[in-house]
Image (cartoon, rainbow, N blue to C red):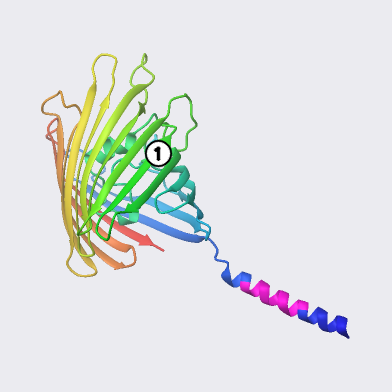
């Protein structure tokens, strides 16, 4: 009889322990993001002038554990615009990283993720304030490294925040990476690195800067690697109703004959008219070679968005574009449909 009672007690207690452990376990989060685009390009003789596009269909798997560890995996099912062959559509691994939070001031991340150079495209795509990034972001930040094309590389990063008091804080990120870009193997002994530092001041204002040093891709039959270094200077403010940002970016490539310097900037402001309606404007300017005159790209973008709740929204962008080398370049109208489940 005692054995039976003991067995029942063990069974009940084990069931309670199992139930408690089962209730405390939380599976990894799964997020699904989908973007569709309707675009009309007024450039002279362009075909097709109007087209439908799938910008991306993205799946994210992430988990943060109580011991400070975590992981993040993200893949796109549509890769048009990221692949070398623009006509191809193929699944692509965008991000895969492991993280460990030692303290607020020391956090480790290892894997494939966005490098901390350039702020406009650094956050998640579902939170971008404009559909297309500025010229300087797309032509410098996006293409860093030997095979850069999606703002990402493979490496290790240390980051953190030190709160000086209620209103002031110091933030930093430093990353060492292969320098070949995402989804590629290392093929040399050199490494690229980024150092980013900033300070938060009252009214949610952040002033920051970043320095990049590395190599770029093939530029001629005789030159395989080109040393390059870049600098960003950023000032931004983020509040519930309004945001504003200004950023200047420059990159210098050490060519065999003469250094090539590209530079540009953008500035934007957005305002939430209601909890669902947001409007904004951005001006951006890019100079592919600062030694050459009349080769500027500049653009004014008007934005209006309706948020259905969460991150589900419709966004309209109208870009008034100017290319000093091509007077046939027309304006661009883009309508974005975004679902974030």
Could you tell me which residue is drawn at 39 percent across and 29 percent down? 146
Residue 307, compared with residue 117, is above or below; it is below
> In terms of image quadrants, where is residue 193?
top left
Assess whether residue 18 is covered by the magenta stretch.
yes
Residue reaching furthest front? Answer: 165
Task: Magenta stretch: give its range.
Answer: 10-20
Task: Judge from the rendering whether residue 120 lies leftward or rightward of residue 180; answer left or right.
Answer: left
In this view, the residue in front, 42 or 73, is 73
Residue 119 in view here: no
Could you tell me which residue is drawn at 44 percent across and 32 percent down? 178
In this view, the residue in front, 153 or 211, is 211
Residue 303, compared with residue 43, is above or below; it is below
Residue 158: x percent and y percent? 42, 43
Residue 232: x percent and y percent? 24, 38
In this view, the residue in front, 219 or 34, is 219
Could you tell me which residue is drawn at 31 percent across and 59 percent down? 337
Q: Secondary structure at mark 1?
A: strand
Task: Judge from the rendering whether residue 290 lies leftward or rightward of residue 310; answer left or right.
Answer: left
Residue 207: x percent and y percent? 22, 47
Assess whether residue 157 is covered by the magenta stretch.
no
> In terms of image quadrants, where is residue 243?
bottom left
Within-10-Å neighbours for mark 1: few <14, some 14–19, many 20+: many
Count the labels in the image.
Answer: 1
Residue 338: x percent and y percent? 33, 59
> In terms of image quadrants, where is residue 217?
top left
Residue reaching furthest right? Answer: 1
Residue 164 in view here: yes
Dividing the image into 4 quarters, which one contains the N terminus? bottom right
| Main SS category, magenta section | helix
Residue 341, compared with residue 295, is above or below; it is below
Could you tell me which residue is drawn at 57 percent across and 70 percent down? 24
Instruction: Provide the residue designation for mark 1.
Output: 175
């Amino acid at each position: 009889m005692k054995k039976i009672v003991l067995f029942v007690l063990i069974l009940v207690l084990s069931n309670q322990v199992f139930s408690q452990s089962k209730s405390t376990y939380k599976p990894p989060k799964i997020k699904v993001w989908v973007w569709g685009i309707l675009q009309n390009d007024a450039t002279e003789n362009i075909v097709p002038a109007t087209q439908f596009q799938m910008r991306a269909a993205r799946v994210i798997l992430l988990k943060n554990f109580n011991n400070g560890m975590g992981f993040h995996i993200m893949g796109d099912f549509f890769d048009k615009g990221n692949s070398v062959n623009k006509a191809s559509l193929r699944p692509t691994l965008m991000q895969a990283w492991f993280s460990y939070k030692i303290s607020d001031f020391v956090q480790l991340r290892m894997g494939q993720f966005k490098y901390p150079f350039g702020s406009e495209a650094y956050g998640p795509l579902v939170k971008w304030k404009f559909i297309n990034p500025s010229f300087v972001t797309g032509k410098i930040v996006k293409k860093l490294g030997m095979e850069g094309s999606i703002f990402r590389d493979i490496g290790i990063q240390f980051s953190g925040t030190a709160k000086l008091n209620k209103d002031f804080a110091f933030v930093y990120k430093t990353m060492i990476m292969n320098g070949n870009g995402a989804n590629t193997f290392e093929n040399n002994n050199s490494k690229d690195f980024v150092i980013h530092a900033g300070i938060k001041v009252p009214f949610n204002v952040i002033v920051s800067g970043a320095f990049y040093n590395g190599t770029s891709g093939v530029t001629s039959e005789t030159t395989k690697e080109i040393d390059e270094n870049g600098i960003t200077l950023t000032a931004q403010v983020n509040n519930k109703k309004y945001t504003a940002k200004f950023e200047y970016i420059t990159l210098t490539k050490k060519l065999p004959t003469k250094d090539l310097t590209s530079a540009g900037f953008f500035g934007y402001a957005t305002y939430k008219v209601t909890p669902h309606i947001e409007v904004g404007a951005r001006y951006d300017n890019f100079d592919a070679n600062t030694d050459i005159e009349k080769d500027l790209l500049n653009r004014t973008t008007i934005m209006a968005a309706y948020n259905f709740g969460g991150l589900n929204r419709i966004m309209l962008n109208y870009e008034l574009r100017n290319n000093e080398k091509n007077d046939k370049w027309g304006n661009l109208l883009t309508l974005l449909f975004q679902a974030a489940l």
